Amino acid sequence: MIYYIFKNQIFSIFLSMAHLTAITFPERITDYVGGTEGDFKIYELNKRQSLVFEPKRKEIDCNFILFEKDAKYYFNIKYSDELASQDIEIKEAQTCSLYSLIADKKDYQLFDCPRSILFVNKSKAKVKVNDQEFLDRAFLSKGPPIFLNGKLIYYRGIIYD
């Protein structure tokens, strides 16, 4: 699965005891930090361009920061048998001007772009989308799950609310 990521945005990765999860980044990884001892084991592969996570317990909910030479990625690692992915390839997200409607709800709209998702807030109040606050509209990373005020609303082409 390809995740198109804006480097300034936080995204979520789900792990499962049923399989390992491999994440491949665009550049060589220089360092990383996150989780607590006993959450998971990490294997470095592909000349330090990939990390493979092997969960050691189900109660995983932590932050993780990964460093490349000229970039940083911030993500949350959580446990979910239903939402976990095995192989994730990270690519750079891009804004766009051509998009198609995914969801039209009372409080928001989601639009699909080739390398991002456009979120439009229809309410007058700020909302928290993937741990960032927005008042009107924002381009989001495409591929990772989208959470609105802490509730999963979109992942893998499925609307959840």
Image: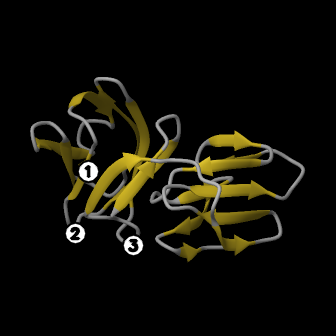
Label 3 secondary element: loop
What residue does disc 2 label? 18
The amino acid sitting under disc 3 is Glu
Which residue is more in the foreground, 98 or 150?
98
| Residue kind at label 2, given as amino acid type | Ala
- The disc label shown at residue 23, or none: 1
Which residue is nearer to you in this view: 125 or 55?
A: 125
Query: What is the C-alpha distance between the residues marked 2 and 3?
Result: 10 Å
Q: Quadrant of residue 158?
A: bottom right
Check the image and report above or below for 35 versus 120: above
Residue under circle 3? 82
Residue 61: x percent and y percent?
Answer: 42, 47
Q: Answer left or right for 87 relative to 156.
A: left
Q: Residue at x 27, y 43 (%)?
A: 25
Labels 2, 1: front one: 1
Q: Earlier in the sequence, mark 3 or mark 1?
A: 1
Looking at the rendering, which quadrant does residue 159 occupy?
bottom right
In front here: 52 or 49? 49
Q: Position of residue 144 (x, y in %)?
A: 46, 57
Tell me residue 21's x, y (percent). 24, 57
- Name which of mark 2 and mark 1 comes first in the sequence: 2
